[in-house]
Every structure is written in structure tokens, then in C-alpha cells.
Amino acid sequence: MRRQRVTVVFAALVIGLTLVELRLVRLQLLQREMWERESRRSTMQFETVPAERGWILDRHGEPLAKTEEVRELDFHFREWRRASGLGQAAALAWLLDGQRRTAREAWEAADDWLEGLGTVRVAELGALQPKQRSRDALTYVTWLYGKAVGREARELLADGPPDPATTLADLAGFAEGLAEAHRRLAAERGALEDLARVSGLGLEALWSGVDAIVEGIDRRVAKVLEADGAPDDPFGRARELHAEFDGDAQSLADGLSYDCQTLAAVREHELAGFAVQASRRRVYPPAVADVAARLVGRVGLPRPADAEQATGDRVRLSDLSSLDDLSAEELVEYEQLRIRVREIDYASTEERGRLGLEAALETQLRGKRGWIAAVRDPQGNLDGEVESAPPQRGLNVTLSIDLQLQQACEQTLQRVLDGRLHGRGEGWPGAIVLLDPQTGQVLAMASAPMPTRSQLEKGYGALEQDALGPLYDRCLGPGSTKNLPPPGSTFKPFAALAALEAGRVSAGQSFECDGQITVGGQTLGCLSHHGQLSLQEAVARSCNLYFYQLADATGGEPLHAMALAAGFGAPTHLLRGNAALESLGIRPESGVVEKTVPLPEQEFHRVDAMRLAIGQAPLDDVTPLQVAVAFGALGTGVVQPPTLIAAVEGYGPVPPGPGQPLPASAGHLATVRDALAAVVDLPGGTAHGLRALVGGELAGRIAGKTGTPEVQNKPDHSWFAGYMPREQPRVAFAILLEHTGEHGGDACVPVLAELLACPALRALVLPEQGP
Amino acid sequence: MRGGRDSPFHDLPWSVLLPALGLLVVGLLFVWSTTRHAADPLWTRQLAFVGAGTLAGLVVLKVGVRQLAELSWPVYLALGALLLAMPLVASSDSSGTVRWINLGFGFKLQPSEFVKLGLVFVLARHLQHRGVTNTWRSYTGPFLLTLVPFFLVMRQPDLGSALVLLPIFMAMVTVSGARVRHVVLLTVSALVLMPLAYFVPGVLREYQKERIDAFLRPIPALMADARELRQKRDHEAAQQVEAHISELKRGTGRQQYYSVVAIGSGGLLGAGLGDGLQNKGNRVPVRHADFIFCIVGEEWGLLGTTTVVALYALLVSGILGVAYRTREPFGRLVCVGVAAQLGGQALMNLGIASGMLPVTGVPLPLLSYGGSSLVATLLGLACVVDISRQRLTVFFES
């Protein structure tokens, strides 16, 4: 034979190896990046470390919402039946005869069972049908009695049918295995007793809880099996289902102590199946949980849109990480997606703000999630931390709200709603706004009816159905009326100011009121015959006819302009669009909604101007917040935009927004202010009743205007708005009660009187007296 | 001086022994790397196997290939009988395959590994004087000698080991005088028959067919398809392809896919011994045995893989060099057979690990963990060593 043939074989092998080498060069040099990306993606698993949510505080630092550690006792059925002696004994008994033993039975009888199982014949174990059942039984035998017993049983069965008389007890190592099993059970009992005691649960409740969970799983499995029809291998199918369902952790109890957590950690081997899970959750202090509940809002699971975003990002990231070559844009997208998936997208069980300020300030309150990217093998065992980032706590937000004032407003409105304040039996929904006119900070913002916290958390559906609309904040938008109320006579001071500024009316100007006036075929009336009135008297008594004539003299345009200047017809930008917040870089999301109606530009015929002057159409829709801001402007001369946030941690205090001076001279303002004082001081003034309710000294500090706007086909609303104290006002207020059919003075003045019983408010009005 | 013609250390073919030693060392390092966290760190056992194999090799050197040649037929027939009897004596594992015989103490014997060497010897004896000639009839002998163990091994089922028998046959027949056109015809018909085997029912089992499917449509190609579909805005079709990919990643295609991921992510220098992500993450099944090469790729990079490929090239050239220099036909044939077996098996394994061939279970000679493979390979190498030292002697009278 020829030696050259050897060369042929050599060539063939070398060619083959060269092809392999070329392939390796392609994989390892040319495509390296793609494979690296895929390798990281397939082995690195992210674990998120939740961040602590920022607190919401009132202006004095009282927490309205905080984050606390909550501990739960979890039960894992799968782990219990596989790793604890009691669970294993119960499972083995079930495998042998199909009867599910309760955990309580296991607790009482496990030792006896283990002894008794010694009489089970090895042949029986082998004969269990189907085959998988026999294998499982042998596995449990090994776990319970030790490897020696298990191995011997397996070998006996593998060598063909064993001697029918051989029982488990006859196997070598049974005695030691049994003794060890008893020791294990004793240790478990001790640990479980301690757990039951320290958790405050008690053994009875513990076992009932466990049994309930196991029964629940059995029911689920049975339901699926039923739906499946008749599977070929019911045992195998049930086994698969159990493998799926048993792994879920179910909660047995919560509110556990730190000691309980330590106990569970230290004795975890004896407490297989039980674990104490600690997590940080949003908590609303019970004492103030109902105060400003709607405003503070609540947290909940992420919205479906959030979940979709998260899934979409993950899928896209997976796609990009397995592509051969990425374009420049794709690379940028890849990096951005990595960050989003790690830190920003919501996990399906994460808390996020869903209502109110919790939602509006989600970005600030949420903080930043931490994460650990670790290599884990398919069994889930950690192989070492590779990359991580610690979580960043959310920012605390300090509101401008004063908890005491808010509480006082809410309680008063509730009394009104229940009919208790006016002693009438039936009450009215309403709203109160208190704010600081110098800085624009809202001190209280209450609206009735209002939801309690537990209604928000658990009865949200019912709240949505409620016709009275407890979910609407009447300070910011329409309640059950579906329309915003007109300001009514509360606009008269602004009309007066406009007329004075326009030079059409002088401070001493008087007009005659004889009850009604007819203009262009329409008759406009006044509440009574006031006779000859000065400006001050007209404001104090709220004479419509005076203002019709004032409007006639002035014309609609100046009135309209003054309305706009005072902030009517435009959003106050309490949160969204708030200039002060935006100057800090904070942009609240939706969650606290303000609804305003713009003031239309139009031609003013005589009647329009007259109606405008008394605060009816075309000025048809105002919010209590707008009214409070406007009256604050009357008190200080500056229209100060309101703000709800006093400070955000890390950003510092929120500065007051840009205030606009009212287009009026000091002298004219003084005139109007005197008129507002006269509303309370003058015996015929519509708010004169205040003196009797709170005393002359206090009443002498308060200036304001009542209003009773007409509404088509429904009872009139009632207003009372103003500021106090008269010099250097520190509180501007607006009180609205809906569809009372009463005069503003009759309905709303008692409300203010009630409010003034609150020491915090008195302190603001009578500062020299102290709180 | 210790030496002389009868000393075991006289005149050793270092061109064979050095590459083999290199491969053994690499194998030990990577068996350590892939199993150090497992319940059983297997490198000590691998070392024991190396020891056992070396001992067996020394016995061969002492006895001499000439003596062993006398036993070719008895050994071949005994192995054949063992293979026939496998379903009775072997323990079946979870998937119902019967490849190992339990020796006790946790050691297993895999007869199919030794069949390869047995075939080499028997073919060498058959071909040493007659060779193959122009006629097809002269092929019947070698054919039958190869086909019988081929089918017996395939029955186990062990497609990979069965396939390794084919290069042995081809190489030895080529060297013993086959005509060019016969060789070409044989190769072509093999290449044609193999795909046909896919379609003939009963030849391949389900999981073997699935492996071929996964090979023909590998995951990177499917991903490129999905990406194209997305660019054409055909999201539904793209989603279907992606769902298929996810299924593959969990199922049959997984092993080879993650093997390629491991190799590719190694880059030039690799992640360092013991530090590969796929290694730590335990993504590639059997990474200490059949798929050990992918961990070499992940942890030692292109440098490592090229070194291994080079070592195999050197080993094969060394053995073929001995064959070239041996005038004596039996010895030459045995060396060619051993080279074909080692080279062919290495090529198959490397091809599978790097995604060039569909998956069949074939260990990487001298590198993979496995006692039977190691001992059989070392026995073969010992034969080569012995032949190299006696290359001038004619063994048998014609």
C-alpha cells in the first residue's frame, strides 16, 4: 500500500480542523459583541431593591403619609412538604393512600405515622400506580428515613419484585433513620411553637391558615383537571399543576414584630415552609388618615399602561441584545432601555401613586429603585454579585396645608352636610378654602362630601357611583352640580373697584334703589328697597340696583378686565403649570385636577354689564380657590398665585409665585376695603350676624362679602369670602355651600364662626393673643 | 544509562505524546472549572481516570501490540456480544438509553468507546495484506465489520459514537489501497444517505430529529428573520418567530445555542479560567463532558480554542507521522485508524460545539470528562507508541 495515502487522510483531517478554526474566528472575533450581549442577558438576572417612598407632611412637619416596615408570615406549601418533617410525613401518607392529611393532624400524629410506616411493605411501595407515584414515594422515604433506607429500597425494587414480606422496618438503617426523624420532628415542633407564640398567632390559627391554603391549592388543581376533561395521566397532570401552584407564597398573618423576623431567620432550617417577609409599605397614620384623604390620594398597583410599557421595554431589550450588529441609534436605544428596565419601569407588584398627590408627585415621592444584576444558574442559586446600585429614597414633600386647619374645615363641612350646623336636618355639600394671601400658600382646602381613607382604599367603586360626587374636590372644580357656581354678589367689590378705576364712579357716589329696573325689555331686580345708598352701604347691604347703575355708568369692558385681572376665568395653576414649581424643575403629573372655565370675550350690552356687575352671566363659573385668591388680592393689593407645596426635600422651600398687582390705586383699594369691613360692621350688613357669633373684637378683624348667586331651576348657592385680619391679612377665605336656597350671610357666616373656634385660625387672626 | 531497546522510555514519539499531554492538562483544568461548584468536583476522578489509562497504556507497551494483535478477533467479538447484551446488563438512565454498565462505586463502563479501538484492530488485521482492490467485493469484509457495530451502537441509541466508526472505515480503506473513484463514491453516498436517514421512519428517534431541526434553523438565523419582519412592520409574524425562538431557547436548541453563545462571548482572550458567565450560570448542559469545548472558548477565548485545535492537529499529524514512517502494514493501519478516530471525533465535537453540525453526543478525546473515553483513547495512543518503536519489524508473514 502506498504511504502517500496517509497524506490524503492527513489532508482531510487538517482541512476539517481549518474549517473549524475559521468558524471559531468568525464567532469569537467578528461576532464577539453580539454573543457577549446575549451571554450577559441570558445569565444575569436583575433583582430590584425597592426604594423607600418619600413622606407627605403638612406645613408643620406632621406626616400625612409615611413608609414603614411591614412584616408578613408567608407559607410556601411546596417547601413545607419537601423540606419539613411534618410536611414530608403528610405528603408520604397522601401518596400511599390518597387521603390528604391536615397540617393539624400532621402536628399531632407525625411521630406515630413514622413508626407506623415501618410496617409498609417495600413491594407495596413499588406497586403504587402510576410509576411516578412510586418514585415520589421512594423519594419521600429517602428524605424521611435517610439515604441508606432509600437506596436499599430502590435496589430491592430495581432487582425485580422483592420479597413480599419485607417491610421498610426490615431495611438496614431504618432504626437510625427513624430516630433521626424523631429528632427532626422534635426540633421542628419546638421552633413552630415559638413561632406561633412570638407571632401572636397561636398554633390553632397557624394550622387553620395552613390547611386553608392547602385546600385552596387542591381546589385549584381540581378545577383545572375538570376543565381539562379526562387526562390520560391524572396523577401526572395533577403533579404538574401542583408543581406550578405550590410554589406561590401565601400570607398567613401580618403586622409581625421584629423579633418574629429574627426568630424565623435564625431557625429557618426547622421552619421550612414558613418565612417572614419584610417589606416597606405606604402607611397613613391612623389618627389623620381621613384628613385630606382625597387630596393626599393613595398608592396602588401600577396601571395597565405601566405594565404594557414595562413588558414592551423588556421585549425590545431582549431583541436588541441578540442582534448581530446594532446601528448607532440602536445602540443608544439599547443603553436607554437597560436603564429603563432597571430603574424606571414599574414591576407588576410595585406600589405607585394612583390618586391625588401620591399620583401628582409620583416622580418626587418614588425615589429610585436599586438593583442587583447577578449571575444565577437555572436552579436560582446565586453565583456572585456582579453589578449593583443602591436604591435612592424618595423625597419628602411638605405641603402648605395646616393639618389642624384642614381638620377643622373638614369637620365643619361635615356638620353642615349632616345638617347639624344649621339645625335643619338636611345639609348641603360645600367647600372651604383658606390661604395665605401674602405667599399664596393654601392652608386648608376642604370639600364635602369627602371620602374616608378606607373608602378610598377599598370602596373606590362605590365612591365613583355616588351621585353626590365625593371624589370631586369642589375647591377646584364642579361637584355634583356639574357646573361651577357663579360668584354672585361676591363679585361686587371687584365691580366697584373697576368702576372707581375707570373714573366713572367716585367714592362718594350714591344711587337710588327702588327694587327693580327695566332695561331693554328685561326687568332686573334687587332683594329689597334700599333707597339712596353710598358705595359702602351698597356693598354692605349688597344692593343689586346700585350695581346695575354702576355697571351702566362704567360699561362691561372695565368690569371684564378687572375680573380677568383678579384671576377669574383662568386656571390658578395650583399644581400643574405652577410657575414656582417649574422654576425648581418640578412638574407634577395628573392626580389633582383643577377645572376652570375661561371668561369669554364678548360685546357687552347694558344688561350683560349689569349682570356681570352682580356676578352672574357672563361670569358664570368660578371655583372657591379662584375666589379666595381674588379676595386675598383685595386684602394685599396683589394677586398671588396659590401653591400647595411648601417645600420639596432637596429642592428647598418653594418660593412664592409671581404675584400681579391688582390694577387699582391705593386709594381706591382703601375705599373698597372699607366697604368690605362695613359688610360685617354695619347693622344692615349681610355678614353682620358674625359679630353676635364670635364677638365684636374678632369680628372687627374680618372683612368680606357674601353672595347668593342664582342658578337656573335650582336653589341658589351661598358664598362668603374675605380676608382677615383687616390690616396685614394673613388668611383669605372662601366658603361655598351648594344649592342652599339661603342667603350667603345666613348659610355661610355660621360656618366661618364655627371655623374660628379653631385655635390655629384664631392665632392667625388675633396674633397678639397667642394660640 | 537506563535505556536500551527494551526500556519503556526508549525512543518515544514525542510528536504524539506532547500534544496528548497538553490536551490532558487542558482537560483537567476545564473539568475543574466546570465542576468546582458542583456537588462532586470531578477533576480528581478525571485524574484517576488518567492514571488508570496510563497504567493500561503501560501494560500495552509491556505486552506489545504484536501480542494484542492476536487478540483482535476475540476482543471484537466479545465487544459485539457485550453490545448485543446491553439492554440486559446495562442500567437504563432517565431517557431509556442503555449506554453504560454500572461497575459499582459510582463507576460506569461505556462499551461503545472501546468498540472503536476494537474495530481499528480488526480492520487492520483484515486489510493488512489483502487491502482493497478494484472490485467492490473486496469492500464487503470491511463494510460488514464496520456496519455491525455501527448498528449495534446506534441501537442504544448512541448516534454520535456510531458515526465516529465511519471515518475509521474510510481512512483505513483509503490507506489500504482503495481507488480514488471508490473513495469518492463512498463519500458521496454517505453524504446522501445521511440526510435520507432523517426521513426514513424508525431510524432516528424524535429527539434526534429535533436536534437536526434546531441545527438547520439556528437561533441567530431566526432572530435575523424576526428583525427583518419587524422592519417590514409585520409584527404578528415577527411575534410568532420570536415565540418560536423562546421555545427553542428552553428546549432542544438550547444546548447548542448556549454553547455558541459561550464560545462567541469569549472573544480573543476569554473571561479567565473559572469566570465564564455561561459556565457559572450553568446554561450549557453537560459542559464538563461533551460540551467542554465551549467553556474553553468562553474562558480562554480564541487563543484557547486555537490552541486546542492546534494541539489536535499536532496530535493527528504525530500519529500519522508514525503511520507514514511505519513500513509494516498492520502497524500503519492501526495508526491511521487511531488517527482517524481521534481526529474524526474531535472534528465532530468541535463542529457541534461551534454550531456547524447537528448535536450528537460525542466526547472530546482527552479533554472531556469520562473514564471510558479517556482509557480507550490512551490505550489507542499506547498502541501508536508501541508501533512507533518497532516500525521496522514486520509483524506477520504474508
Image: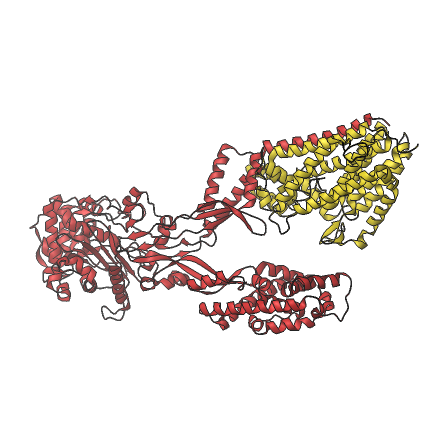
Chain colours: A red, B yellow
Q: Quadrant of the N terminus of chain A?
A: top right
Q: Residue furthest front?
A: B1
Q: Residue furthest right?
A: B398
Q: Give residue A527's quadrant in the image.
A: bottom left
Horizontal side of residue A260 vs A562, given as left or right: right
Horizontal side of residue A48 vs B297, given as left or right: left
Q: Give residue A182's quadrant in the image.
A: bottom right
B220 to A407, vertically: above or below: above
Compare residues B38 and B343 and report the one nearer the observer.
B38
x%, y% of residue B58?
A: 78, 40
Question: In this orientation, does residue A762 appear?
Answer: yes
Q: Give residue A103's quadrant in the image.
A: bottom right
Which residue is located at x 50 percent, y 63 percent?
A267
Horizontal side of residue A505 vs B355, given as left or right: left
x%, y% of residue A198?
A: 45, 68
Question: In this orientation, does residue B191 appear?
Answer: no
Q: Quadrant of the C terminus of chain A?
A: bottom left
Q: Residue furthest left?
A: A508
Horizontal side of residue A380 vs A458, given as left or right: right
x%, y% of residue B358?
A: 70, 40
Compare residues A239 and A450 and report the one nearer the observer.
A239
